[in-house]
Image (spheres, helix red, strand yellow):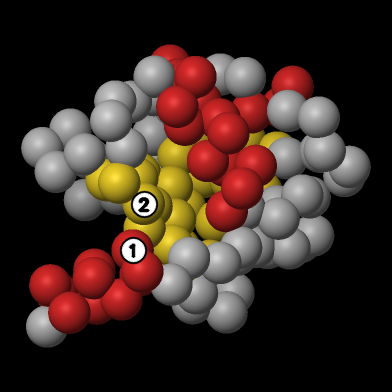
Amino acid sequence: MRDITSNYLLRNPYQIGALGHIVETDESMICKYNGGWDREDKNMFLVFVPDRSSETLLPLIKTFIKPGTTIYSDCWSAYNGITEIEVTPKYTLEERKTTF
């Protein structure tokens, strides 16, 4: 089931998030995917990435996440430029809180 879902998301990309929405992002070192999940409407995106650099990830955020969205991430250093991306309204970046 996971493979079917992954293949669908890779073949059918679209923008998620909105003003007032929270999107959680994560990059995978093993499979070289980056993805996001909108907490409000449960939409997702998944994209293959050649590396986890800011030069790769920041344009993907602009492509797949709507302006004004609050982005929760693990604050990987590549995300540092999110608030500088030229969009209106601006993105907000917050560290994802992990609880055990």
What distance separates the C-alpha of mark 2 from that of mark 1? 6 Å
Residue type at mark 1: give it. Leu
Number of disc labels: 2
| Residue for point 62% across, 19% down | 81
Q: Compared to 69, does 27 lie above or below? A: above
Residue type at mark 2: give it. Val
Left/right of residue 72 with respect to residue 86 in the rendered view: left
| Residue for point 59% across, 74% down | 40
Q: Nearer the viewer, residue 33 or 37?
A: 33
Quadrant for residue 4, please give it: bottom left
Quadrant for residue 49, please give it: top left
| Residue for point 36% across, 69% down | 11
Identify the image quadrant of the N terminus.
bottom left
Q: Compared to 60, does 22 lie above or below? A: below
Q: Which mark is residue 10?
A: 1
Q: Position of residue 73 (x, y in %)?
A: 45, 39
Mark 2 vs 1, N-terminal side: 1
**Mark 2 sits on what residue?**
47
Left/right of residue 64 with respect to residue 84 in the rendered view: left
Is residue 94 visible to the viewer in this orientation of the structure? no
- Disc 2 on helix, strand or loop? strand
- Disc 1 on helix, strand or loop? helix
| Residue for point 44% across, 62% down | 45
Q: Nearer the viewer, residue 48 or 75?
A: 48
Left/right of residue 64 with respect to residue 48 in the rendered view: right
Q: Position of residue 97 (x, y in %)?
A: 41, 43
Is residue 89 visible to the viewer in this orientation of the structure? yes
Mark 2 touches mark 1? (CB < 8 Å) = yes
